[in-house]
Amino acid sequence: MSVLAYIESEEGKFKKASYEVASYAKAVADEMGTDLTAVVFNIEDTSELGTYGVNKVLKISNDKLANFNAEAYADALKQAAEKEGSKVVVLSQSANSKYLAPLLSVNLEAGYASNVVALPESTDPFTVKRTAFTNKAFNFTKIATDVKIVGLSKNAFGLKESQGEASVEEFSPNLSDEDFTVNVESVDKATNKVTIADAEIVVSGGRGLKGPENWGMIEEMADILGAATACSKPVSDMGWRPHSEHVGQTGKPVASNLYIAVGISGAIQHLAGINAAKTKVVINNDPEAPFFKAADYGVVGDAFEVVPKLNEKLKEFKEKNA
Amino acid sequence: MKILVCISHVPDTTSKINFTEGDTKFDTNGVQFVINPNDEFGLTRAMWFKEKQGASVDVVNVGGAETEPTLRKALAIGADTAIRVNTPATDGYQVAKELAKVVKDGGYDLVIAGRESIDYNGGMVPGMLAGLLDANFINNCISLEIEGDKAKAVREIDGGKESLSASLPLVIGGQKGLVEESDLRIPNMRGIMQARKKPLNVVEPSESSAKTEAVKFEKPAPKGDVKLVDPDNLDELIDLLHNEAKAI
Ligand SMILES: Cc1cc2nc3c(=O)[nH]c(=O)nc-3n(C[C@H](O)[C@H](O)[C@H](O)COP(=O)(O)OP(=O)(O)OC[C@H]3O[C@@H](n4cnc5c(N)ncnc54)[C@H](O)[C@@H]3O)c2cc1C
Ligand SMILES: Nc1ncnc2c1ncn2[C@@H]1O[C@H](COP(=O)(O)O)[C@@H](O)[C@H]1O
């Protein structure tokens, strides 16, 4: 038996979501009375994983896997799961994990539940709680197959440290040319920017900001807080901000710890995509804006007055608490 | 080139979500259904291939007769033929299995599906379909060009994008970016008239079975009232965010 966790890394470092995946997978393993095995790709030092409950690390070192490749990674994970006799495979909901999970599901003939937000309600039958209808509801899904795949939503479980050290085993999956038929030609990625997917805090602007020239104060707040920037749909449709910042039902989902919305009305399609954020703050000059019904904290006021003042205070706060 | 566009039939984005039968069924009462937004982008891109490069475009849905108006809308936008696999969609795997049969029987070169449906948010069907067909797969696809049997695509990754190449047969999970929002096709009168005469073929399902089951639903707990902070007292906001919410 054993529970298997796919531990993602980037530029030689584990991603934070991976520690959450390990913490969750450990709790599932405990419930099932079994151990946790982690699979890592091209990482030298895996000692940190023991801290999050991993009992054993399967280390895959292969130059052909230096860049993410959904089919090849799914094939490697399948072989790891088979070797370990894993009954549950846990992965994150990053763009890459969401890409490979359905392929892995077919490889292992395993049922897959995505966007899972809590520990299994029961492990026999195996039933998990997931979001559905773009965060407007939850859904309990029973996975009926022998092997189960769980896609864990970001910030849904948190990190749980435990005492321990993981044993390490080298693992060389058999990969074939068939695994490498989709090729990456180039990658275009801002390296020094926090992404909406990884960010703890997201600062977002809407049409209330009047024009792209006014985004300086939003970027400043994001800088102070180490946050990612986002926007409402009309803002990206009008080209004020890039499409990659569009959040909501038809844009990117937000599951950060804090979401700060400036000059955003709070339309149902916007809220659907950001409801999973833990704490929501709205700054809007219209007290009737629907966002006030969805937010935890609100300031009724003119963004052009409130935001610069708030930025000054946040700077002071950060300096004091550095 | 033969293109198949997978169409998921979903509640309009403004829909209030409710459940019936002891929270086990989605309440469709008063709900307006539409083409899944991600599939609209895919369908418009498919029309571009048809008009600029020569291709046939069929659309398919796995579902009951209630999805036919959505398929007719896709025909009105310009698809040539619609196929409905006559069985309720129960999970991603079952849908992918049914679609795989349609793709094999029809000999399609390119399958355009959406990154995810906005109802169940599975994000499963395109990848599973590619896996079942042993076809190439590109997810979160925001640009697609085809030249002969070679595809060039751009995929959105966390924090950027990646350019990829692959040969057909190919399945993509598409989204906004495949075409611009302003280029989305809306059915016009002529399209609607023509759609009435286009074939909508109902095929019977194969033996496919689901691997997961949605047993019950739950609505999020009602939220407490918003705490309002005076714009002249922003220190209070910082205090609340730091000490109460532990968010900064
Ligand atoms: C199919 C479909 C899908 C959609 N998907 C999405 C989606 O994914 N994401 C999304 O965001 N939207 C989506 N929408 C659009 C959505 O319905 C709203 O139109 C949109 O969210 C509104 O954006 P906004 O709040 O920035 O602009 P507005 O609704 O124009 O709101 C601007 C707000 O700014 C406030 N304001 C104005 N001046 C100031 C000031 N000086 N200081 C402070 N506040 C000020 C106003 O009071 C107002 O509340 C979708 C719509 C459809 C039909
Ligand atoms: N019942 C269905 N019939 C046809 N295509 C579907 C169906 N369900 C999902 N799809 C396709 O698969 C994509 C992703 O759906 P999902 O995996 O349900 O999130 C959708 O955007 C559609 O293109």
Image (tube, rainbow, N blue to C red):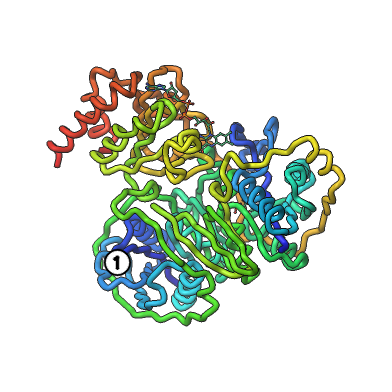
| Quadrant of the drawing holding the N terminus of chain A | bottom left
Indicate whether A291 appears above or below B139. Answer: above
| Residue carrying label 1 | A12
Give the percent coordinates (x, y) of residue B2.
72, 62
Q: Quadrant of residue B10?
A: top right
Helix, strand or loop at mark 1: loop
Asked if one can make out residue B215 in the rendered structure from this viewpoint, the answer is no
> Foreground: B133 or B27?
B133
**Residue shown at 36% from the left, 74% from the top:** A58
Residue B30 left/right relative to A35: right
> Foreground: A30 or B48?
B48
Residue B18 left/right relative to A259: right
> Foreground: A222 or B116?
A222
**Residue shown at 24% from the left, 17% from the top:** B232
Q: Chain of mark 1?
A: A
**Residue shown at 47% from the left, 54% from the top:** B156
Give the percent coordinates (x, y) of residue A322.
14, 42
Indicate whether B110 appears above or below A203. Answer: below
Give the percent coordinates (x, y) of residue B54.
72, 59
**Residue shown at 46% from the left, 44% from the top:** A243
Q: Quadrant of residue A206?
A: top left
Asked if one can make out residue A135 in the rendered structure from this viewpoint, the answer is yes
Q: Quadrant of residue B189?
A: top right
Residue B93 left/right relative to A70: right
